[in-house]
Image: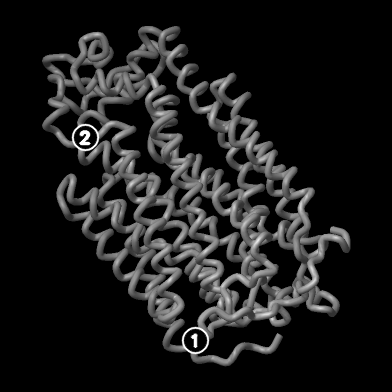
Amino acid sequence: MTSQDTLPAAASPEAVPADKQNGRAAVVPRNYVVPFALTTTCFALWGFANDFTNPLVKVYENVFIITTSQASWLQFAFYTGYFCMALPAAMFIRRFSYKAAIMVGFAFYAIGALLAVPAASNASFGLFLLGSYILTYGLAFLETACNPYILAMGPRETATQRLNLAQAFNPVGSLIGMGVATLVLAPQLQTADFRERLGQQDADVVQYLVIEPDATSEAVTDLADGATVRTYAALPDFREEVGALDAAMPDALKGFRANDPEGFAAMQRADLEAVKMPYIAIAAIVTVFLIIYAVTRMPTFSEGHGKAPFLATAMNIFRRPRFREGVAAQGFYVGAQIMCWTFIVHYGMEQVGLSLAEAQSYNIVAMVIFLCSRWICTALLRYFSPGKMLTIFAVGAFLFTVGAIYLPGQTGLISLVLISACMSLMFPTIYGIALNDLSEEESKLGSAFLIMAIVGGAVLTKLQGGLIDAYGVRASFWLPAACFVLIALYGVRTFLKFEHQAPAAA
């Protein structure tokens, strides 16, 4: 970063001129409108990656014939990348600048996305995992840099609202990712066509199920390729038996692979080629943004004194309950969000009998609700306490999650969709609350720990995948329900204690 990248008014959050809007401090001062707009595009770019990845868990289950728990390694790899790279990103920002970190993030993003090419060519689930892991190195750099960067682009009293405004563009990227998955990817998947034909009891597909009149549904059969499948006393009624189609799907696919390995390999290759193309496109788009960012002047923020040692800064911020409890709350929130959005596809397919594209369309509806709710919440935060709003929305999310567990079929799915209205507020509000009384240099490091908390999406999603295999998709939603309870407790702590504390000395 050179001196020409520094805009005149960029010194510290406190030094930013507070433009007035109707007597209130401006959310985005006029001199930061262009940097704010350009940085906000990053929120949409990582939204795309997050929500194009979610439905791939179900896709890889079928393409590689693996369990939900095994396919959930995709989310584990994706969100573990955040955990591993957030602190290095923070140290990079402290040494260089927000702008440089964002450019590094773009580079990692493109490299990880392009690993989908050899992964598809070699039909390697492991390479897809590696690509997702490296891609999120880039997202860790972007999120660690962009969130505190946005907070710094204006007066402290409007920081949480400013971050909510920037985060409101994240669902735009998410909607694009979901749209690509639903409208571009899903119609091309031959495994989806195979599932539909199985549900219609097409003889050409049903032949791959092992049906023996004297067998029970618990019996198993060893196939020629070493796979073990269930045998059936009679063909299940896929239209009437909830979950029967998805339970039979891996058995039919294994039978197809054992009896026609070339046909199965061709189907697998075609589906992975379809998965690959969106990754190539997003790599090209991210590269364009890297170039744009490289040639654009962006503000720098400096407190005008030397940087405190890394360890001392970390110990100082973790002494503050507002921050350390915020890190925990953020981990629970991200875990709950990813669980609800990843397994909405499983819920729709297994509990309502939808196709992949139909189930994913509910995810799109959830994201539209999420986007609209975030805009509404951004406005409401000018009038209501962040802590109180966080508590109310977390309680609402818990109640909708309980509805998804107990309400039947379509009604339960609608309740699951409505959780998104309550989640819209949570990430940026927890973020803003946790960093509220930190200095500029502390915020850079604090941001890294909050981004590391995204590992909750890795651990909890993997755990829910195991719960789905063991207890079914409905019972598994007690896990996100528990997360919302813990988030509500942080909200209560915030409005009863933290919001009445004077800011800590920098």
The image shows residue 477, relative to residue 177, as above or below, that is below
Q: Residues within 10 Å of mark 2 (few under 14, many from 20)?
A: many
Q: Which residue lies at the image location 55% right of the left edge and 27% below the top edge? A: 276
Give the image quarter of residue 10. bottom right
Is residue 458 placed above or below 33 in the rendered structure?
Answer: above
Tell me if residue 60 comes above or below residue 331 in the rendering: above
- The quarter of the rendered structure image containing the N terminus is bottom right
Q: Quick one: which residue is furthest to the front in this view?
A: 22
Relative placement, left or right, of 227 versus 7 is left
Residue at 39% from the left image edge and 28% from the top image edge = 186
The residue shown at (56%, 73%) is 27
Earlier residue among tags 2 and 1: 2
Percent across and percent down for residue 416 are 28, 53
Q: Which residue does the image show at 28% across and 31% down from the upper left? A: 355
Please name the residue that numbered disc 2 is placed on: 353
On the image, the x and y values in percent for residue 55 come to: 41, 38
Q: Amino acid at mark 1?
A: Glu
Measured as percent of width and height from the top left, residue 245 is found at 23, 28
> Which numbered tag is attached to residue 397?
none
Camera sees residue 469: no
Specify the amino acid type for callout 2: Gly
Q: For residue 290, what is the image quadrant?
A: top right
Give the color scheme: rainbow, by chain, secondary structure or one colour: one colour
Q: Quadrant of the C terminus?
A: bottom right
Q: In the image shown, does 460 or 93 lie closer to the viewer?
A: 93
Q: Which residue is mark 1?
A: 499
Tell whether label 1 touches label 2 (CB within 8 Å). Answer: no
Local secondary structure at mark 1: helix
Q: How many marks?
A: 2
Q: Mark 2 to mark 1: distance in Å?
A: 47 Å
| 29 sits to left or right of 498 | right
- Residue 419 falls left or right of residue 143: left
